[in-house]
Image (cartoon, rainbow, N blue to C red):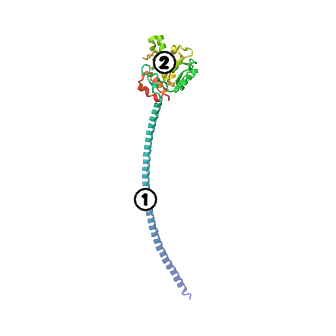
């Protein structure tokens, strides 16, 4: 029996080897097939992924185009809105200007003094009493246009702080008051009164925006006002408060009146000061442009 044992072992070993080879071949074939399947699946998945990526790129491009279009549309609408808003502001500004002009007495910047005429019925729309501390005659009430009053007080207060003491000797005068004044002057000076006194209806005092100024030292004898510190201060500063000298030297209306100051608004007074001109140098059309801002 020992004779056949090696053969049996060889047989068994061979069987195992053949079986292993067969199984290995089977597993190899199976692995190759699985690899092919996996490769095919991967290729399919990759293609599908690439298609999805391309679609996403297309969708993204479309979304970007739509976003650009929406942005352009939004900008266009904003431009339209800005344009319309600008137009509305212009219209509102024009309406506001017209409303201001409607409420502002156009007579306030007219050139009187032998040019335009104020009839006997004209009275400023809003007169206010001047504080007596600014008056030469404390017992004789005087009036000024109410909108001019704060400018007038500022002028006097700042002049006083600068050492230029002043007092008002005359302010608003009605048509009737001017008539009486002119008659008295004519009785005293004859036709010579026309050189320094306006006829009724031509006086700037009737507007309620004009004052005659003196100093405590001069009092009623204010014809020497030109020599005072007050006149020098007014010449240099009155325009800042909207006042101008109506009748400077060499004017063609009346003799030089250093005491006679008229309110025309800060804008116009500044223009006249900076341009070294006086009120009656300008045309009425130029002057009228400042009516809307006379009390600004």
In this view, the residue in front, 48 or 237, is: 237
The residue that appears at 43% across and 26% down in the rendered structure is: 287
Asked if 151 appears above or below 2 in the picture, the reply is above
The residue that appears at 42% across and 25% down in the rendered structure is: 284
Q: Nearer the viewer, mark 1 or mark 2?
A: 2
In this view, the residue in front, 8 or 172, is: 172
Mark with earlier residue (1, 2): 1
Read off the residue under disc 1.
55
In this view, the residue in front, 229 or 293, is: 293
Asked if 99 appears above or below 82 in the picture, the reply is above
Asked if 38 appears above or below 131 in the picture, the reply is below
Residue 195 location, quadrant? top left
Q: Is residue 244 visible?
A: no
x, y (%) of residue 51? Answer: 43, 61
- Residue 7 appears left or right of 112: right
Circle 1 crowding by C-alpha within 10 Å: few under 14, some 14–19, many from 20: few
Circle 2 crowding by C-alpha within 10 Å: few under 14, some 14–19, many from 20: many
Describe the element under mark 1 as helix, strand or loop: helix
Describe the element under mark 2 as helix, strand or loop: helix
The residue that appears at 45% across and 67% down in the rendered structure is: 41
Q: Which mark is residue 223?
A: none
x, y (%) of residue 223? Answer: 51, 14
Whether residues under marks 1 and 2 lie with C-beta atoms below 8 angstroms apart, the answer is no
Residue 163 location, quadrant? top right
Q: Which mark is residue 178?
A: 2
C-alpha gap between disc 1 and disc 2: 95 Å
x, y (%) of residue 251? Answer: 43, 17
Residue 289 location, quadrant? top left
The residue at the far bottom in this view is 1
């Amino acid at each position: 029996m020992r004779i056949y044992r090696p053969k049996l072992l060889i047989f068994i070993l061979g069987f195992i080897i053949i079986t292993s080879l067969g199984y290995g071949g089977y597993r190899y074939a199976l692995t190759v097939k699985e690899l092919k399947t996996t490769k095919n699946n991967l290729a399919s998945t990759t293609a599908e992924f690439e298609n999805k990526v391309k679609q996403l790129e297309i969708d993204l491009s479309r979304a970007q185009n739509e976003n650009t279009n929406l942005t352009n549309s939004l900008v266009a609408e904003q431009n339209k809105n800005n344009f319309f808003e600008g137009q509305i502001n212009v219209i509102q500004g024009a309406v506001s200007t017209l409303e201001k002009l409607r409420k502002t007495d156009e007579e306030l910047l007219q050139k009187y003094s032998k040019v335009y005429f104020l009839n006997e019925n004209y009275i400023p729309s809003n007169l206010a009493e001047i504080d007596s501390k600014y008056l030469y005659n404390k017992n004789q009430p005087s009036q000024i246009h109410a909108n001019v009053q704060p400018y007038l007080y500022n002028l006097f207060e700042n002049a006083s702080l600068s050492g230029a003491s002043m007092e008002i000797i005359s302010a608003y005068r009605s048509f009737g008051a001017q008539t009486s004044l002119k008659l008295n002057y004519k009785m005293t000076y004859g036709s010579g009164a026309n050189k320094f006194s306006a006829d009724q209806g031509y006086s700037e005092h009737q507007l309620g925006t004009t004052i005659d100024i003196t100093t405590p030292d001069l009092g009623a004898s204010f014809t020497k006002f030109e020599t005072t510190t007050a006149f020098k201060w007014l010449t240099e500063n009155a325009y800042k408060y909207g006042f101008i000298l109506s009748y400077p030297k060499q004017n063609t209306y009346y003799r030089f009146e250093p005491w006679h100051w008229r309110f025309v608004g800060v804008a116009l007074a500044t223009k006249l000061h900076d341009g070294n001109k006086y009120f009656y140098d300008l045309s009425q059309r130029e002057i009228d442009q400042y009516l809307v801002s006379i009390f600004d």
